[in-house]
Amino acid sequence: MNEETTLAPASSPVQSASNELSGPAETNAKDTSTTVLNDQPDDLEDIQLEMSNFEKEISKAGSVLDLAIPATLETYLKLVANAGSAQFPWNKIKPLFRVKLEQVIHEFNTRFDYFKV
């Protein structure tokens, strides 16, 4: 894989997601990946509330594979992947990351069935 295929284009969905949460004041910034959610306490509170609600859903669900991650949290995950900063303590976001990781691994295993003999 060459370097070009690993880099996101200038108008990537991740940057669009960043603009959704950071608002118009941040869209003119030179590097939106480093200004993710820094000046938006309302966005942080919304995400924290969504994470709390999602954590309750995890405890009720039989399987994390059946859970639908809310759009707000999906956007948050993209922002964390883009910026490299989670904005919250690990113990608060760990359940969300665990569910997403398990879903991605399951999807990979079902799409690319390398492990069947």
Image (cartoon, rainbow, N blue to C red):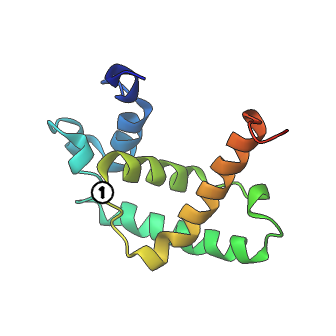
User: Which one is nearer the viewer's eye here, 40 or 9?
Assistant: 9
Residue plotted at (76% across, 56% down): 65
Residue plotted at (39% across, 35% down): 16
Number of numbered discs visible in the structure rendering = 1
User: Which one is nearer the viewer's eye here, 15 or 50?
Assistant: 15
In the rendered image, the quadrant that contains the N terminus is: top left
Q: Secondary structure at mark 1?
A: loop
Quadrant in which residue 56 is drawn: bottom right
Residue plotted at (83% across, 69% down): 62
In the rendered image, the quadrant that contains the C terminus is: top right
Q: Is residue 98 left or right of residue 28?
A: right
Residue type marked 1: Leu
Q: Is residue 97 left or right of residue 40?
A: right
- Percent across and percent down for residue 33 are 26, 44
- Percent across and percent down for residue 94 are 51, 71
Q: In this picture, is 16 found above or below 97?
A: above
- Percent across and percent down for residue 88 are 37, 71
Q: Is residue 33 left or right of residue 53?
A: left
Check the image and name the residue furthest to the left: 30
Categorize mark 1 by other alpha carbons within 10 Å: few (<14), some (14-19), many (20+): many
- Percent across and percent down for residue 32 are 24, 41
User: Which one is nearer the viewer's eye here, 4 or 85?
Assistant: 4
For disc 1, the marked residue is: 37
Q: Is residue 74 left or right of residue 90?
A: right
